[in-house]
Amino acid sequence: MTDNQTVVSVTGLEIRIPDGPVLLSGAGLTLRRGRVTALTGPSGSGKSTLLRAVIGDLPAGAHVSSGTVEVLGHDVLALAPDRLRHLRRHQVAHVGQDPGSALNPRMRVRRLVAETAVDPSPQAVRDLLAECRLPVDDGLPDRRPGALSGGQQRRVALARALARRPGILLLDEPTAGLDTALRDEIAGLLRHLATTRDLAIVLACHDPELVDRCADDVVDLATACRPAPRPATLPARPEDTVSHPDGMAGNGLTAHGLTVGFTRHGRARLALDGVDFAAAPGSATGIVGPSGSGKTTLLRVLAGLQRPDAGTLTLDDQVLPALARKRGRDRQRRIQLVPQNPLGTLNPARTVGATLARPLRLHQATAKADLADRVTGLLADVGLPADFARRYPAELSGGQRQRVSIARALAAGPDVLLCDEVTSALDPDTATAIMSLLTALRERHGMTLVVVSHEHHLIARYTDTVHLLDAGRITDSGPTASLVAMT
């Protein structure tokens, strides 16, 4: 170590998959007590891989081909398994990009936090939740992860990490999926933690506003250039070649009076409260609102993954069954969801190619001889090279997994594409490229696009109509230009 304040020192680190891609090349990182370091760079530049390397957790099949990783004076890459477990449990806390997947779905929030806490007392747990900007008086401590929004899951995971009282805190996109106000609160919290707890904090981040607000030091990871998305070649759908007999396509996707409630210890809470929703054929519709306002629940109901307690759904004026499994294959194909956290939905045992080939076979009846070319085309559509077809999800960055998730949804040739914070894990250039891609697909094929996002500048630029959601209710709807500012 160079001084008493330096707790992590990474030099010249290269990580690669044998006979496969280089995941990280020549990376360096120095963390000091009481300081916040931001790790920036384009999607795929190795930010998540570098964070995991600090705790000796390399992606499956990967190995270190050069470089060193020292944490609190220990060579992490040479530590015995028991010493490494002790380091992770007591001294270094890591919150990954998809923290919800690490939360036991059967455990309630208060127990999830108490499980890792130095002080597991009820009051200490409540204080930690409140410190992480979570409500403690509305029943949230007694909910399970499935009843939380993505942003709430992320803050519960942060509370679990802080409960260990570590000296080093590693955060991967800590404000992804959070609204601007919460992002600023989390920025203030990280500064407070670094100062009052003498914590060394590093965060992988695409948000320049967050970096400006809380970072003392910035490490930018350079990366090789990657191909930009080419013009879209979405597989042809039956509706592209068969005209409607009356020349009309119906009224698109609509919902009336959607209500979804959760009950915990006899207390009822409404995630959606009588929501009306409409997305006309070929339109681009945005849904915005604070974290926890019900945006993801609304998309899940539209996709048939969450049964509403009340309300009706229609697609082109035909009643739509509440659950996807009862909709039949064609209507399942017509409505596709791209979730906020792709890692939990991509099968880790399947290559990217196999993941994309399945909907091509199932919904497009693509011949086996044509699958490889169609997969290559889908990858190119989302800005990924053809050799990514051989990779597994663990070999991808968070942004790359998100693009694969989008490609999988597009493979079905949907009429309606529901996108839940699909740009939250992407750098600004890639986020703009993905939204431009989705816009091109919408315009070419008349596809309806529904986008949930906290990035209001993207909603303002790429949608026509917007619904404002707050506390489970639609508070306003109308033209995006009059309701959402570009900044």
Image (cartoon, rainbow, N blue to C red):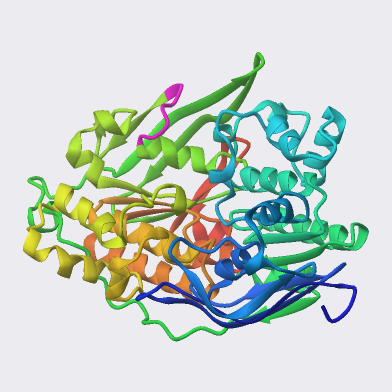
Q: Residue at x 15, y 55 (%)?
A: 237
Q: Quadrant of the N terminus?
A: bottom right
In the picture, measured across the screen, residue 46 lies left or right of residue 138, that is left
Query: How far across and down, in percent of the image, does residue 415 sit?
Result: 25, 51
- Does the magenta segment cover residue 404? no
Q: In this view, which residue lies farthest toward the front?
A: 80
Q: Residue at x 46, y 35 (%)?
A: 276
Q: Quadrant of the C terminus?
A: bottom right
Specify whether residue 463 is in view. Answer: no
- What is the quadrant of residue 216 in the picture? bottom right
Query: How far across and down, in percent of the image, does residue 173 sit?
Result: 62, 61
The residue segment tinted magenta is 304-310
Q: In this view, which residue lies farthest toward the top?
A: 266
- What is the quadrant of residue 81 in the picture? bottom right
In the picture, measured across the screen, residue 358 lies left or right of residue 199, that is left
Q: Work out whether residue 360 or residue 89 is closer to the camera in this orientation and state it.
A: 89
Query: How far across and down, in percent of the image, does residue 179 sit?
Result: 65, 54
Q: Work out whether residue 361 or residue 340 is closer to the camera in this orientation and state it.
A: 361
Q: Residue at x 22, y 65 (%)?
A: 375
Q: Work out whether residue 187 or residue 96 is closer to the camera in this orientation and state it.
A: 96
Q: Residue at x 87, y 31 (%)?
A: 123
